[in-house]
Amino acid sequence: MKTASLRSGAAAALLRGVVTLAVIAVAWEGLVVAAGLPPHYLPRLSVILDAIISLPDAYLAGFLRTLSETVLGYVAGALVGVMNGVLFHRSRLLRELIFPLFVISQTIPVIAFGAVVVLWFGNTILAKALIAFYLTFFPVTVNTLNGLESVDRRQVDLLRSFGATRLQLLWRLELPAALPQIFVALRLACTLSLLGAIAGEWFGDTTGLGVLLLQAMYNEHFVALWAAILMSGLLGTSFYGLVAWIEHRVVFWRSEL
């Protein structure tokens, strides 16, 4: 029964998403036609989709390249962020020494950081992934730390009274209790890592959605610009939806509260 309920809920969410996209598509096309908007303000959606279909290889290659950079930076940033949160939770000294440096690092504009990284590693996937990592690890660190710090101390004391070790406390109580806050940061980091990957491609590359955006802007090709924006939105929305679905499966008890 529970599995069937989850499946029906997922199907209903998917149906709502499809209906919402259909409504937006019809409204977009109708608004442009009815208002007579010129293409340099807002092209018709059908024209944008036709531009993507006419050059499928370029947009698919750009989509996959940016996806790989985003995922690499996101996964690394998520893992490092969770580990940082655990370390800062365990050691107040480390928190006082290192956490301020993390805060200072986030005041560096991503453009400046990206320029340095590209100079170090060149126009490689690694460089773009590092920029995505830079925007990902900090919010995950902060939310992991906040989640661990908010665990009920009475529950901790109870498990300790039964002889639980620090590792058992972490895996069986603290991390599960912190998961809701961790996933808040993970959902936020979806868009941040994508922005980092696209920004990294602006420093010079031959493939990627950021490259397509830059080329369209310099050539004043408005339809191509909107096509790249649409593909970026598709990537970001799909990535966010995947993380939200994982959250729903992992933090399953939230739906039962």
Image (cartoon, rainbow, N blue to C red):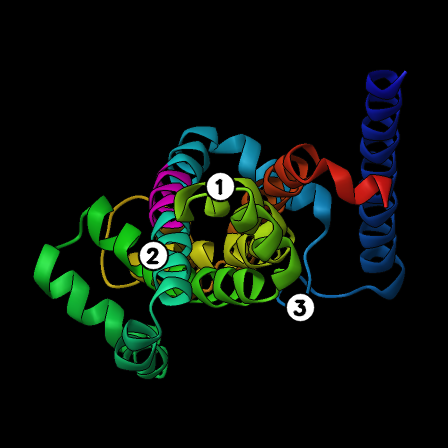
Q: Amino acid at mark 3?
A: Tyr
Question: In terms of sequence position, does the residue under pointer 3 or pointer 2 come before the other?
Answer: 3
Real-space Cα distance between discs 3 and 2? 34 Å
Crowding near the residue tagged with mark 3, few <14, some 14–19, many ≥20 C-alpha atoms within 10 Å: few
> In the image, residue 237 lies at what x, y percent?
63, 46
Identify which residue is drawn at 84% across, 55% down: 33
Real-space Cα distance between discs 3 and 1? 53 Å
Crowding near the residue tagged with mark 2, few <14, some 14–19, many ≥20 C-alpha atoms within 10 Å: many
In the image shown, does 161 or 254 lie closer to the viewer?
Answer: 161
Q: Name the dominant secondary structure of the magenta segment.
A: helix
Question: Residue under circle 1?
Answer: 171
In the image shown, does 232 or 50 lie closer to the viewer?
Answer: 232
Numbered range of the magenta stretch: 65-76
Pointer 2 with pointer 1, Cβ within 8 A: no
Question: Residue under circle 3?
Answer: 41
In the drawing, does residue 113 fall left or right of residue 28?
A: left
Quadrant of res 36: bottom right
Query: In the rendered view, would you say 78 is above or below 96?
Result: above
Name the quarter where the N terminus is drawn. Answer: top right
Q: Amino acid at mark 2?
A: Phe
Question: In terms of sequence position, does the residue under pointer 3 or pointer 1 come before the other?
Answer: 3
> In the image, residue 166 lies at what x, y percent?
41, 49
Identify which residue is drawn at 54% across, 52% down: 186
Residue 133, label in figure = 2
Identify which residue is drawn at 77% across, 45% down: 254
Q: Amino acid at mark 1?
A: Trp
Please tell me whether residue 189 belongs to the stretch shown in magenta. Answer: no
Query: In the rendered view, would you say 100 is above or below 142?
Result: below
> In the image, residue 241 lies at what x, y percent?
65, 41
